[in-house]
Amino acid sequence: MQSSAGKSITGQIVQEHAAQTGFLRVLAVDDEVPALDELAYLLRADPRVGRLHTAGDATEALRVLRDVDVDAVFLDIRMPGLDGMELARVLGRFAKPPAVVFVTAYDDRAAEAFDLGVADYVRKPVRADRIAESLRRVLATRLVPAHPAVAGRRDRQDDPTIPVELAGTTRMLPRSSVRWVEAQGDYARLHTADASHLVRVSLATLAERWADAGFVRVHRSFLVQLKLITELRMTNTGYVVVIDEHELPVSRRHTRELKDRLVRAAKSWS
């Protein structure tokens, strides 16, 4: 029986061999010809791409996919007809769905993107280093089943991701790492154990989408992960909950429901 270390080394060797021999089959989709040409140029320049197909819209992409199998689809979001989000949902129903990398100039549909378990989310204008990073993630999903990127795709329904900006790069943040969410106008700030990220999605949208994952509204400006609450206490200004030693206000209209939820949760955990 091969050891886990042996499997890891084998996976690394396979990855390196694939990178050298042009293993990946990729489809690039964009309705804007200059953008598609630039994306195709960067993909062809990477030695890990063995075969590249292009399409000018979702209909043409589906015609290509009817005749060939691909490992990854690099996909614009805003396109006429069937847009990138809709096409990604169709791809997700394939018997062997390809990895999806969104390539977009916009972040206003992030609330939909993180539900789809995409491999990466690249902002235009595209750069060679970002395409290289996306291909690394795609290659991991194709060749190393134990790689975190693969586990993330398998578990995307239980722990979806949301694209966030970090030092000029878009990363996929797992929902499970979010401790609480703070409303900031039409945006929401996601607080993790060691950082915070501003995303273009409303608190109301997240409250609806994340309700089944244990997130509860405690205030018009705050959404919290119920299981992370360590205290609910009364102060001079009203109730607060404590998460990671941070006090967050609880509005009067949410107090009774929160108390009931905490009691029910305590019974289920005991």
Image (cartoon, rainbow, N blue to C red):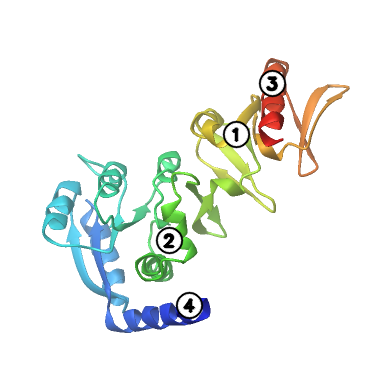
| Mark pair 3, 1: CA separation | 14 Å
Q: Are marks 2 and 3 in contact (CB under 8 Å)?
A: no
In which quadrant of the rendered image does the C terminus lie? top right
Q: Earlier in the sequence, mark 4 or mark 1?
A: 4
Task: Name the residue rendered at 53%, 52% in the picture.
Answer: 173
Taking 19 as reference, is 218 above or below it?
Answer: above
Q: Are marks 4 and 1 in contact (CB under 8 Å)?
A: no
Front residue of 75/2: it is: 2
- The amino acid beneath tag 4 is Ser
- The amino acid beneath tag 1 is Phe
Task: Name the residue rendered at 53%, 28% in the picture.
Answer: 204
Residue topped by disc 1: 215
Please, what secondary structure does the residue beneath circle 3 have? helix
- The amino acid beneath tag 3 is Asp
In which quadrant of the rendered image does the N terminus lie? bottom left
Which of the numbered marks, if any, corresponds to residue 260? Answer: 3
Q: Earlier in the sequence, mark 3 or mark 1?
A: 1
Q: Earlier in the sequence, mark 2 or mark 1?
A: 2
Residue 142: percent from left, percent from top: 34, 67
Q: Quadrant of residue 234?
A: top right
Residue topped by disc 4: 8
Q: Earlier in the sequence, mark 2 or mark 4?
A: 4
Task: Name the residue rendered at 20%, 48% in the picture.
Answer: 58
Please, what secondary structure does the residue beneath circle 4 have? helix
- 197 left or right, relative to 24: right
Residue topped by disc 2: 150
Q: Quadrant of residue 223?
A: top right
Question: Dot 3: few (<14), some (14–19), or many (≥20) neighbours within 10 Å?
Answer: few
